Amino acid sequence: MWSHSRRQRIPRGRQPVHVSDRLGDVLSGWTIHTAGGLPNGPHIDHIATDRRLVAELVADWPASDRVGRLSDRSCMTEPQWQEGLYLDDRAKAGKWETVLEILRPDNHSVNINQWCPGSDSRSTVLHRAAENGAPVDVVEALLALGAFRSQQDSSGMTPHQIAERNGSTPEVLDLYRPDPSPLDPERITVLDSYLGEALDWWFGKVLDFSNPRNLLCYNPVGVLHEPPGQELWIQQPRFSGGARVVLRWGYLEVLMGFRDFQESGTRVVTYGCVVTQVGWAHVYESDSAPPPPKDESPVSR
């Protein structure tokens, strides 16, 4: 089955080599992944397999409102909202001891790569560190917590560019300098576009929204080389599920699913997509609905 937004098949000569074989290998070897910080998780990121099951953690992407409004806070709980505001306030003030305490691993209300709720600046804690000339040990601590060096703010600036503009020392600049993506800028732009189409289809289908980007901000392809496993989890609001975006050799795998808890059991819906430089293709789907409830009515004799 192919994307409803792009009906044409991807020309075989321009596909990733043996993409059907690759997807077969991936699907046959899927393990159980947990993703999403409490209180929205952890979530089981699909699929059963006849191999030994392995639990792995997938880094979260802070998919808050695209333009920073979040006026109804529909993607956040109240603790997440308040902690996010406090985190950004302390980072702007250069209160790094407090910032690192807020970002302790057992605090699931915040994400190291989130920006301030209600702000359109898209400035993360690492951006604030670059703006305020944070000490080397603070920058090292933020990077150890998983801060993305290639993440851009709303003006397109990375923390390294901000630190360079502010005259930071060579030692500090070296810390902020992002590792290069294996993708060239042109391919990143193209994959960003097609990834957006694929996620629009999924979140629009599940959430019944005509424009999911009014609610969610999708992860940029340009940061996917940074997290462990080169993959990120996008939690969908109001459902136990989301989308897992994985960077492969020049293309993306997008594994999407949700669980629906019903009286007769749990329904698990999963989809798989491949995103390449020439489009995106819906290549896998599964709907394991629970069995219908037994008829308890008395049998007439």
Image (cartoon, rainbow, N blue to C red):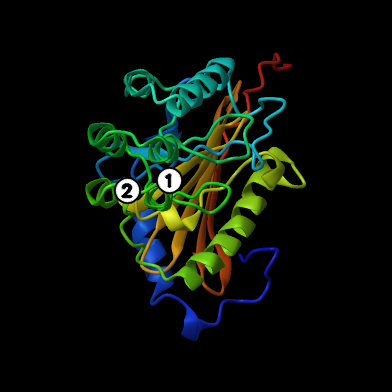
- Residue denoted by label 1: 232
Query: Can the viewer see residue 268?
Result: no
Count the numbered circles shown.
2
Between 261 and 71, the one nearer to me in the picture: 71
* Amino acid type of the residue tagged 1 in the rendering: Leu
Q: Is residue 281 above or below residue 166?
A: below
Question: Residue drawn at (67%, 30%), measured in percent from left and top?
Answer: 70
Label 2 secondary element: helix
Give the x, y percent position of residue 297: 71, 15
In the displayed structure, does residue 300 sit left or right of residue 64?
right
Quadrant of image for the N terminus? bottom right
- Image quarter of residue 4: bottom right
Spatial separation of the CA atoms under disc 1 and disc 2? 21 Å
Q: Residue 31 lies in what quarter of the image?
A: top left
Question: Which residue occupies the foreground of this view, 238 or 187?
Answer: 187
Q: List x then y, in percent, for residue 77.
A: 58, 20
Along the viewing direction, whichever of 191 and 26 lies nearer the viewer: 191
| Contact flag, marks 1 and 2 (Cβ < 8 Å) | no
User: To which residue does mark 2 refer?
Assistant: 176
Mark 1: which secondary structure? Answer: strand
Q: Residue at x 48, y 82 (%)?
A: 14
Q: Is residue 221 above or below residue 90?
A: below
Q: Quadrant of the C terminus?
A: top right
Whole-percent x, y for residue 255 in the image = 48, 50
The residue depicted at 66 percent of the width and 16 percent of the height is 296
- Does 133 sit left or right of 298 as displayed? left
> Residue pushed farthest right?
210
Q: Residue at image x 50%, y 72%?
A: 186
